[in-house]
Image (cartoon, rainbow, N blue to C red):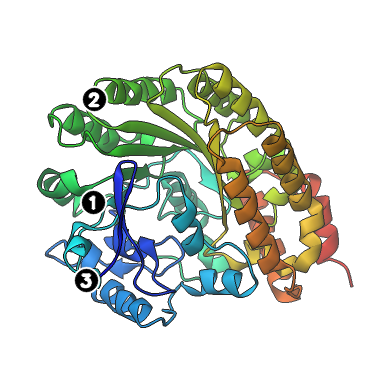
Amino acid sequence: MSTIKVHKNNIINEKQSDLQCRLKWSLSTVFLTTNTTASCHRCDHNPITEDFDFHNTHQKVHARLQMLRNEWPELGCEHCRVIEQAGGMSDRLLHDELEYAPSSPVELLKDPNAVHVTPTQLEIYFSNLCQLSCTYCGSHFSSTWESENKKYGDIHNFMVPSDLPGKENFQELKYLDKVFEYLEEKGQYLRSLYILGGEPFIQPQSDRLLDFIESSGDKFKNMRLHFFSNLSTDKAQEKIDRLVGLSENGKIYEASIVGSIDCWNKQAEYIRFGLDTSLFDKNFKYIANIKSTKIMASINMCWSNLSTFTMPELMDKYSEWNELTLEAGRPWGVNISLMQVAGKDFMHPRIFGPKILDWGYNESLDKLQQAIQAGLSANGSIGKAHTYFEGIKKSIENETPDKFQQQELHRYLTELDRRRGTDYRELFPIIYEEIHKS
């Protein structure tokens, strides 16, 4: 029988095997634009069935059974396996260490080996409406990308085959009403609800959700509500105020705003095309200065071979935002997380081998260490982030440069420059030079 721990607002069952991943049991993601689901951002998406039992697809249940047998599932779990085999901190291990580790499904209280379960963390991608067209993204997450492809042709026609979704009716949102029916029926089991995009702060479905929670009594009083945003919209502060109001009035346990940003300066605006870093800075400082203790601020970074160069400048901004948060009376500071680019192999840092670590990544690690020494986080979140960053570094140290993928990167960026009137060689000269070395 498993041991039960009460972890602040969560109940967490001890794992039943060494390879069991809390995310596989506790987390589900619903992509309304593609009618698919997953239980980890690293893993393949499964079609949502007509009964809308998105958390218990055949693929997810099979993966849970494999993990209980101490077997690594395929179809995306290789990401954690590689990092762990290199001695690093993987996503799977990190989620055991988080201050708010994923709460266990209620079914595990009776049967710790249950594999048909109810999620306690739900991520929703309402639509692809977004004002940015990030280099590593596509029409499945960005309406701006969709419009660009309609004007210039599908970007995939210029590249090697990709595993990204093909052409879809992104505006259909077949299961939108089902989502709200699910929240009405099982919302009380949720401990975290994440809203991602596109850009949620400009999507009408986000207003519908906020109205729904406002009118739902105390159903969501134990739930943290997280919004991911590029914070490059004038509508951000209005939405932030609504989230603070929900948390202050006890409609939710806590509100969390995650600013999506990868690096800084013009390089960041090239990577996340359409981003306004000055507006991002203004909006994040607005969050940092909020005096309510019911609001959490975070940044989430995507590490690509382009973002590495000005990551250190972002670390400087990160320390600045932390200091503002501490002055506002929130001693836990600003959380920080990092993922590696997925879906476009030519944008992954590994294609340049370990030398890419010297192009800004190692300096960023040093700056995180300085933030730890400066005491910018009372709950140790920066220390956990530093450990995670170190794990990703270890997974790159033995990589071999891939000249083919480097050339694919050049083809891709050249095509983007043609469409957007940009020139990657000016902002990323080391990338250009490295690709063209004989």
Is 207 left or right of 416, judged from the image as shown?
left
Q: Position of residue 180 (x, y in %)?
A: 16, 44
Q: Position of residue 31 (x, y in %)?
A: 31, 55
Residue 260 visible in the displayed image: no
Residues under labels 2 and 1: Cα distance?
30 Å
Residues under labels 3 and 2: Cα distance?
33 Å
Position of the N terminus, as image quadrant, is bottom left
The numbered dot on residue 173 is: 1
Is 306 left or right of 241, judged from the image as shown?
right
The numbered dot on residue 272 is: none
Is 182 left or right of 150, judged from the image as shown?
left
Pick the front one: 75 or 293: 293
Residue on which disc 3 sits: 114
Q: Position of residue 281 (x, y in %)?
A: 59, 26
Which mark is first along the chain, 2 or 3? 3
Q: Amino acid at mark 2?
A: Gly
> How many other residues sit within 10 Å of disc 2, few (<14), some (14-19) or many (≥20)?
some
> How many other residues sit within 10 Å of disc 3, few (<14), some (14-19) or many (≥20)?
some
Query: In percent of the image, x 26 and y 38: which residue is there?
Result: 205
Residues under labels 1 and 3: Cα distance?
31 Å
Q: Position of residue 76 (x, y in %)?
A: 46, 72
Q: Amino acid at mark 1?
A: Leu
Residue on which disc 2 sits: 250
* Camera-nearest label, 1 or 3: 3
Residues marked 2 and 1 touching at CB (< 8 Å): no
Is 357 left or right of 101, judged from the image as shown?
right
Secondary structure beneath disc 1?
A: loop
* Camera-nearest label, 2 or 1: 2
Which mark is first along the chain, 3 or 1? 3
- Image position of 429 with respect to 436: above or below: above
